[in-house]
Amino acid sequence: MAKLGRYSAQRRKVEDVTASKTLTDADCGTMFTCGGATATLTLPTVANCGKGWWAEFWVDKASPAATTIQAQGTNLVFGFVLTVDDNDPNVQINPPAVETGTEQITLTTSCCAGDHVKIWSDGVNYFMSGQSQKVNAITAVVE
């Protein structure tokens, strides 16, 4: 039996976003590179993905196309994204302080390479965190 070397111990699943798609339980642990095409990525239902499901969404283009991350349901995604403007000491939180969740996060065309959102599920809700180099480049819709 061959041993796996250390080179593969931290290897990540990476998928380029080239079109809209509905994510599944099998997409757990995937890092999606966004910005190559305008797309909507629909998260699996929390019932289907279960506790521990996670994915990351990273902008990898200097002039990206918009990518929307959509939950199936309302008020399911809790957390926030920190956004700043170069060398401005004022950090913005998006969405602003709210007690209900969101269902739609958009990495806009204002994003920079390296901006990102991480999402995971506890089996009941989703939780997000992220960072952007531009104020309001990543937006979250609260309805």
Image: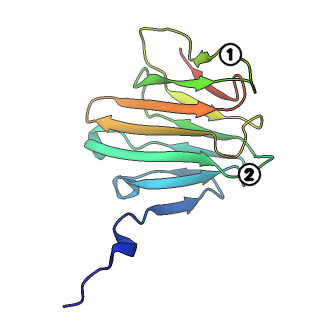
Residue that badge 2 annotates: 61
Please give the name of the residue rendered at 81% of the width and 46% of the height, measured from the top-left corner: 63
Could you tell which of marks 2 and 1 lies nearer the N-terminus?
2
Q: Is residue 73 left or right of residue 124?
A: right
Element carrying mark 1: loop
Residue that badge 1 annotates: 89
Please give the name of the residue rendered at 46% of the width and 34% of the height, measured from the top-left corner: 71
- CA gap, disc 2 to disc 1? 25 Å
Q: 62 above or below 143?
A: below
Q: Amino acid at mark 2?
A: Lys
Please state the horizontal and vertical placement of residue 1, each as a whole percent of the image: 18, 91
Q: Residues within 10 Å of mark 1 (few under 14, many from 20)?
A: few
Q: Is residue 122 left or right of residue 105?
A: left
Evaluate if marks 2 and 1 touch, with contact meaning CB atoms under 8 Å apart.
Answer: no
Q: Residues within 10 Å of mark 2 (few under 14, many from 20)?
A: some
Q: Amino acid at mark 1?
A: Pro
Q: 104 above or below 90?
A: below
Please state the horizontal and vertical placement of residue 109, each as a whole percent of the image: 77, 38
Q: Where, by quadrant of the figure, is residue 128 drawn?
A: top left
- Quick one: which residue is furthest to the left in this view? 1
